[in-house]
Image (cartoon, rainbow, N blue to C red):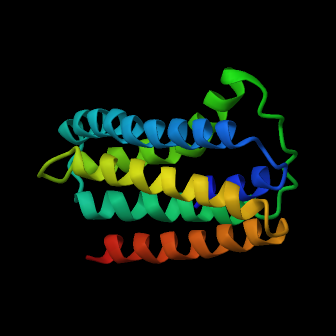
Amino acid sequence: MDAFSLAILYGTLSLPKKKMLTLSILVGIFHFFMPLFGYACGKTLLNFISINPHVLMGVIFCLIAVQMFFSLSKEEELLPLEGIVALLLFAFTVSIDSFSIGIGLGGFGGNIFIAPLVFSLTSFTFTISGLVLGKKINKIVGNISTLIGSLLLFILGLYYFFT
């Protein structure tokens, strides 16, 4: 949701289609690899401490949701997306939360590549959708989508915490 809401804001700048596509692909790539890095760290962490992976995942989701909620009150200045470094920085910053999700995934079994693949495809879709929608709607929708996303993430966190 953070990628979507920021993409809406940047979409209001009427970026060229090639830049929109490049940015969306980069966000998707980062959302694939960041959970894998988090997973590796999470597996290491869970070797040293004993905690129920559901509780860890719940805490992580709730913390991300609270951070997203409080970011609504900040006046964020849009940085220009000129050059590959700016595009990579955007992709990294909206993907950093998927690193923490990967930490929580360290406690679950199964195929570790499924979740990052879903994150990647979803974030690509949300980013390109946000950029396109941003051309058509005003900036307030970005704040509303962040609020909805933070609430849903918090509810999901509580679900994991109590299961």
Horizontal and vertical percent for residue 48?
Answer: 22, 36
Left or right for 90, reference 153? right
Residues 118 and 66: in front is 118
Q: Residue 149, relative to residue 40: is it above or below?
A: below
On the image, which quarter does residue 133 sit in?
Answer: bottom right
If the image is split into quadrants, where does the N terminus sit?
bottom right
Q: Residue 58, relative to residue 116: is it above or below?
A: below
Number of dots carrying numbers: 0
Left or right for 29, reference 49? right
Horizontal and vertical percent for residue 45?
Answer: 28, 37
Q: Residue furthest front?
A: 17
Q: Residue furthest left?
A: 110
Q: Residue 151, relative to residue 108: is it above or below?
A: below
Residue drawn at (71%, 28%) of the image: 86
Left or right for 18, reference 12? left
Is residue 5 among what the camera can see?
no
Residue drawn at (82%, 71%) of the image: 140
If the image is split into quadrants, where does the C terminus sit?
bottom left
Residues 99 and 6: in front is 6
Horizontal and vertical percent for residue 103?
Answer: 34, 44
Horizontal and vertical percent for residue 8?
Answer: 72, 59
Residue drawn at (82%, 63%) of the image: 73
Residue drawn at (66%, 31%) of the image: 87
Left or right for 151, reference 102? right
Is residue 53 among what the camera can see?
yes
